[in-house]
Every structure is written in structure tokens, then in C-alpha cells.
Amino acid sequence: MRSITLAILMTAAVAPLAAIQAQAFEAKCLLQVDGKKYLDRRCNAEVDPDGSFRIGVDKKASPYFAYVNVLEDDRNKAEASWNKDPKSTHAHSDLGTVSYDRESQCWINEHAKICWSNN
């Protein structure tokens, strides 16, 4: 009886997390670092409910990818990183804090420009 109750409680606790999933789709992507375009074409993208996203996530289609993690206290700012080494499987290279630019619809700072669109 106790194990059944524990299983029910665990399922109830995990269920809300399962409902919050990233949406994956193909998008037009741009990853530019220090003026060089590493990704400028259609790619796989994943967007979280909070607006954080990842582009170029299919290593078979693109050797480069980037992560943009929106800050909780300021939704117009995010921490960005990428895989500077195309053989890397993690986005270990920090791009710093990026800000959302409404005109270009990209996340930018003095070193990086990261974009995705449905077009």
C-alpha cells in the first residue's frame, strides 16, 4: 500500500513538469560571433515556454549550435553560449549577456548575434 501511495505522489509531482516542454521545429537561424557567420540557414530549433532557446541542435545538419537562456528577472536579457569548437557536444563557450533587439528580432551584444524565425 505504501509503495502505491508513493508512486501516486511521485507521478503527481512529475506530471506538471512533463506538461512544460520545449517546442522543436525547423527555423531560419543565424549565429554570428565577432562578425563571422557560423550558422546562416534553416536549422533545428527548440524554444522553451520562458523564451529560452537553442538553435542548430541537430549535429548531423549543423556543426555549430547556440543556447540562449532568458534571465528570470529581466526577460529582455539572456545568457548565451555556443560550441566554438565544432567537434564539441556542449555549448561551453560563453558569449555573455545578450539583449533582445526588437528591430532585428535577434539577441545581441558586442560579440554575438543569435536569431531564429519561422520564415
Image: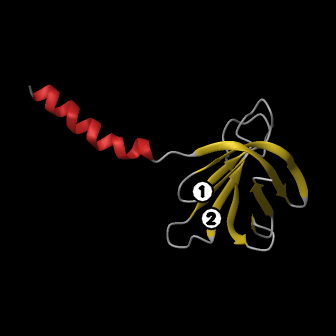
Which residue was labeled with disc 1?
Answer: 52
Up-down: is 119 above or below 1? below
The N terminus: image quadrant: top left
Q: Amino acid at mark 1?
A: Ser
Question: Which residue is under mark 2?
Answer: 78
Q: Residue at x 63, y 61 (%)?
A: 79
Packing grade of label 1 (10 A; few <14, some 14-19, many >=20) is some
Callout 1: helix, strand or loop?
loop
Q: Residues within 10 Å of mark 2 (few under 14, many from 20)?
A: many
Give the colour scheme shown.
secondary structure
Q: Residue at x 80, y 38 (%)?
A: 86
The image shows residue 37 at horizontal and vertical percentages of 89, 53
What amino acid type is highlighted by mark number 2? Ala
Front-lying residue, 7 or 77: 7
Q: Give residue 7's quadrant in the image.
A: top left
Q: Nearer the viewer, mark 2 or mark 1?
A: 1
Q: CA distance from mark 2 to mark 1?
A: 8 Å
Q: Residue extending furthest left?
A: 1
Residue 9, image x, y percentages: 21, 38
Dot 2: element? strand
* CB under 8 Å between discs 2 and 1: yes
Residue at 57% x, 70% y: name it. Answer: 75
Identity of the residue furthest to the right in this view: 36
Q: Give me the residue at 78% from left, 29% from top.
A: 60
Q: Residue furthest front?
A: 119
